[in-house]
Amino acid sequence: MLTGEDYKNGQVLLIDKPLNWTSFQAVNKLRWSIRQAFNIKKIKVGHAGTLDPLATGLLVICTGKMTKQINTFQGQEKEYTGTFSLGSTTPSYDLETEIDKTYPTEHITNDLIREATKGFIGTIDQFPPIFSAIKKEGKRLYEFARAGEAVEIKSRKVEITEFEIIQIKDFNIRFRVVCSKGTYIRSLAHDFGIALNSGAHLSELRRTRIGEFKVENALTPEEFINNLTPQKH
């Protein structure tokens, strides 16, 4: 069983983030719980890569001296699974905002869907969503978006090494993607819709891996906190 000193010296915690939690909430919850359990006044806790509230899955959370490794972990390859919904778009490219446009889907075949994935393998130019936390002129992009202000967004080069279609059902596409740091799966959903001469948005997302860290080895925040309680010692 880990001690308060262990957490101060530095731990890497694998957490399975629940739906509708922010990454910030998960970090705060763990920090508070560690401080309470071991009567620690102050401890550094941070995460290696944000997950949107509507995404679930792996958060790598570092404590104490291991927070110095956050940049290293953030730079590692990531794997996601999820669902693209074809035939409609949203301003945020996911379900954070309402559907704003619908598109024809009659021409889309399973072969066309599988063929379209090939255009996204390798190094690609990707525009981050306007509803993202990227900073421009000292403000987050989503602040411009929520205020209805137009803002120019520059494309970024990202790398997609694997893009696999797992299942196609009623224009909902289950997929698996392996990609570099900085890849927005919401943007991939949006661009995938365009590649099919239609529209698409991300309706489900789960991060399954960061580098060597896998979600199957992660605990939910609740499980982690239960393991901290004194009666478990």
Image (spheres, helix red, strand yellow):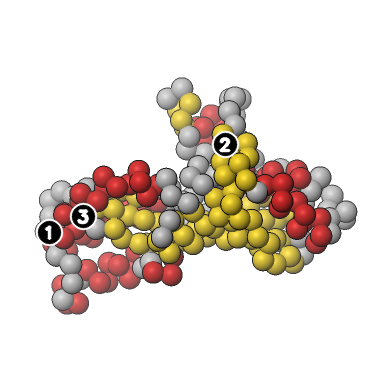
Q: Which residue is mark 2?
A: 157
Mark number displayed over residue 41: none
Q: Residue, x 17% and y 64% (percent of image)?
A: 37
- The reply to whether dot 1 and dot 2 touch (C-beta < 8 Å) is no
Q: As shown in the figure, which amino acid type bears the numbered disc 1?
A: Glu
Q: Nearer the viewer, residue 160 or 137?
A: 160
CA neighbours of label 2 inside 10 A, class few (<14), some (14 to 19), many (20+):
few
The image position of residue 144, as x and y in percent, is 53, 29
Q: Earlier in the sequence, mark 1 or mark 2?
A: 1
Mark number displayed over residue 5: 1
Q: Is residue 60 visible?
A: yes
Q: Residue, x 35% and y 46% (percent of image)?
A: 72
The image position of residue 141, as x and y in percent, is 51, 32
Q: Which residue is mark 3?
A: 10
Q: Nearer the viewer, mark 1 or mark 2?
A: 2
The image position of residue 185, as x and y in percent, is 58, 49
Q: Nearer the viewer, residue 94 or 122?
A: 122
The quarter of the picture where residue 126 lies is top right
In which quadrant of the rendered image does the N terminus lie?
A: bottom left
What is the tally of numbered marks visible in this picture? 3
